[in-house]
Amino acid sequence: MLMGIDPVINAELIHALMLMGHGDDLVVCDINHPAQSIARETTYGKLIDVSGCGIARAAEAILKLLPLDTFVDAPVRRMLVVDDPDRQMPIFSAVQDVVDRAHGTPVNMQALERFDFYAAARRSFAIVRTSDPGPYGCFIFKKGVVLL
């Protein structure tokens, strides 16, 4: 344990966050997402588990350390509900609130069809699986530049 670092951020997660560069993507997902199989295809190559917390809580902890990319229209992406793309799941607004608070301004979130989301997840830097039961708790955060 270190001072000033949220206890949700375990050693493996902080290591992965430190390795990421601007423009890299981080997937934060629920327990329903095929995270283990997709994680093998990411840059990091293995799954990062943050057991014992939900997506909104994990996003809150991660976004204290990870700046969002301000050079893209939608630095956050999420999965669309299959066969009902207009449906809004409670997790969508919960994460939107966390992202907006962390960024200090409203942040655009792009919705992706399920298999487009999986393809984007495979191209990501790493996948973080929470204990959130979902469904549709699948988000991609694009890392921005840390300005000193």
Image (tube, rainbow, N blue to C red):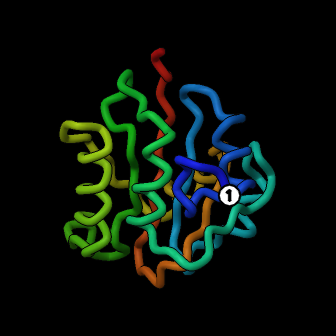
Q: Which of 133 and 114 is in front in this view?
A: 133
Residue located 20% across and 67% down the image: 86
Left or right, 130 with reference to 108 = right
Q: Nearer the viewer, residue 29 or 8?
A: 8
Helix, strand or loop at label 1? It is loop
The image shows residue 137 at horizontal and vertical percentages of 43, 70
Q: In this view, does 112 lie above or below 74?
A: below
Q: In this view, does 53 lie above or below 23?
A: below
Residue located 72% across and 59% down the image: 39
Q: Nearer the viewer, residue 53 or 26?
A: 53
Residue located 60% across and 68% down the image: 129
The image shows residue 45 at horizontal and vertical percentages of 80, 52
Count of marks, rendered view = 1
- Farthest residue, direction top: 148
Q: Which image quadrant for residue 128?
A: bottom right
Q: Can residue 120 be seen in this view?
A: no
The image shows residue 60 at horizontal and vertical percentages of 40, 55
Q: Is residue 112 above or below residue 57?
A: above
Of the residues shown, which amino acid type is indicated by label 1? Met
Q: Can residue 89 be seen in this view?
A: yes
Q: Which image quadrant for residue 106?
A: top left
Left or right, 110 with reference to 28 = left
The image shows residue 122 at horizontal and vertical percentages of 66, 51
Residue located 46% across and 74% down the image: 54
Mark 1 — residue?
A: 1
Q: Which image quadrant for residue 112?
A: bottom left
